[in-house]
Amino acid sequence: MPQDDQPQDAGNQPSPGEAATDDFVVRSHTLPSGLDYTTTAGRMVLRQEETKDGKSDGFRPKAEIFLVAYTADQADSAANRRPVVFAFNGGPGSSSVWLHMGLLGPRMVDSGDAGSLTPPPFGLTDNPETLLQHADLVMIDPVNTGFSRVVDGNESGEFHGFEADRDLVAEVIRLWTTRNNRWLSPKYLVGESYGTLRAVAVAGRLFDAYGMAVNGLGLISTVLNMATLDFAPGRDTPYALHLPTYAAIAHFHGRHGNRTLPDVVREAEDYAGREYGYALTQGARLSSEAFDDVVGRLAEITTLDPGFIRRTNLRWDYAQFSAELLRQENLVVGRIDGRFTAPPAHQQDSANWDDPSLRAINGPYAAAVNHYVRAELGYENDLPYEILTGRVQPWSYKSFEGVPVDVTETLERLLAHNAHLRVHVDYGYHDGATPHFAAEYVWAHMRLDDAARARFSHHYHEAGHMMYLKPQCRLDQLAALGEFVRSR
């Protein structure tokens, strides 16, 4: 109440969220290599211009977006020459913690890896190969992930969709770039999983809305055309595109004897692209003899039981594969990373939806980020840090109504309009969520000339979706990403 204890005029009251302000905390640090850097952690208030009766009605706070920025300490002129990497994960519903504390940042999770997981309460270690050595980093959490939320009085569902999410992340990048005077810095977008689809869409939005051209896209465990992953009735392509991943995971679990992984994967790719793909198109037109031949070959390649393959009519999704591959050992395999296993909740289940790989790594990452943000970055907030949440569902793809969600045309256009745009791609052979062969299918069907295709670099890892869980893969990945952002 005012000091005179009289009711305040309701017309002068701020609207909900009106008082929202940025709440960044700035701290200084030094890498083991000697590089001094600054962290800026907190929530950036995003405002949108509103109109009423055709007239401007001011800029209203809409959302508070949590980000962590890492910037090397140097003169402004040098900063303008230093690349900036804007990074985010996917889901939708995932925070940036995986790329932030698993790969890119100067501190990383001590999680262990498949078969050698670190026990609770886990921990943090230095990441000497951090990408911060070569570029400044800005880690972004979309609405309802991490600490990001809408301001009081707004609907979070407004930002839970392809276009709204794209525009929000693009606005975060534009605003950070403007406030930090980095328009002349080389700029890169790095996304993982749905974050790769987001990265392409955001790059298109930045170019179309603000004239901002990015230098490169880092696509980790990529999906740009959802039709390649969607096991839908009448859509046979995903079954063939998953086959090499099934073979690779079977190989990891010792089902292919002394054969090498490249040999096993190559055989599966050849069969998927030829005989298997053809057989799927034939349906009931396939003769019984030909059907039996396909069953036999699929059993050899995947090591699955021929009876299972026959009962599924040559078509099974990943949840069924997860439950079936190691059924005799009373184990299911992970989807995010097929190297991980766990006993099934019910041994008789025909499909497994409880991913043991996510169960294994969620705890270490949650412990690390909640400690790190408060204890080392100095940012305090009593909200739960949403690691991987369903609070963004339902997710709207209304702009793709009646057609598959696909951003390849946006990438084609960006490559045509920006002759210097380069694309870095990371694949995990044991990734059941975004199989490498599905991504290769997308590249093969894009309308690109040889010069544009030469601007892609492809990197394969004997690991899963988060290939950086495996120490050697993390080192290889960071070396390639470092070269990617340095080479212009």
Image: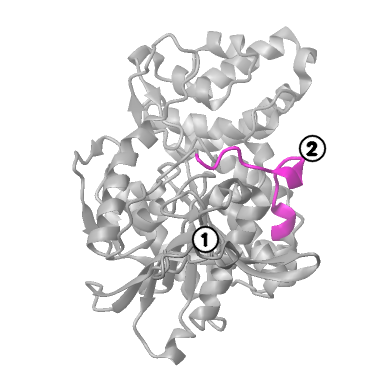
Q: Is residue 73 magenta?
A: no
Of the pair 392 and 250, the residue shown nearer to us: 392
Of the pair 299 and 311, the residue shown nearer to us: 311
Q: Nearer the viewer, mark 2 or mark 1?
A: 1
Q: Residue at x 37, y 34 (%)?
A: 357
- Tag of residue 388: none
- Magenta highlight: main SS: loop
Q: Position of residue 202 (x, y in %)?
A: 62, 61
**In the rendered image, is residue 456 in sight?**
no
Query: Is residue 432 found left or right of 210 in the rendered image?
Result: left
**In the rendered image, is residue 262 in sight?**
yes
Quarter of the image where the C terminus is located: bottom right
The color scheme shown is one colour
Q: Amino acid at mark 1?
A: Gly
Range of residues picked out in magenta: 391-411
Above or below, comparing residue 192 to residue 259 in the picture = below
Q: Position of residue 221 (x, y in %)?
A: 51, 48
Above or below, comparing residue 320 to residue 18 in the picture = above
Q: Amino acid at mark 2?
A: Gly
Q: Badge 1: how crowded within 10 Å, few (<14), some, or many (20+)?
A: some
- When asked about the image quadrant of residue 53, the answer is bottom right
Of the pair 422 and 95, the residue shown nearer to us: 95
Above or below, comparing residue 344 to residue 430 in the picture = above
- When asked about the image quadrant of residue 378, the answer is bottom left
Secondary structure of the residue carrying numbered label 2: loop
Q: Residue at x 39, y 11 (%)?
A: 347
The answer to whether marks 2 and 1 mark residues whose Cβ atoms lie closer than 8 Å is no
**Residue at image mark 1:** 17
**Residue at image mark 2:** 402
Q: Position of residue 101 (x, y in %)?
A: 34, 55
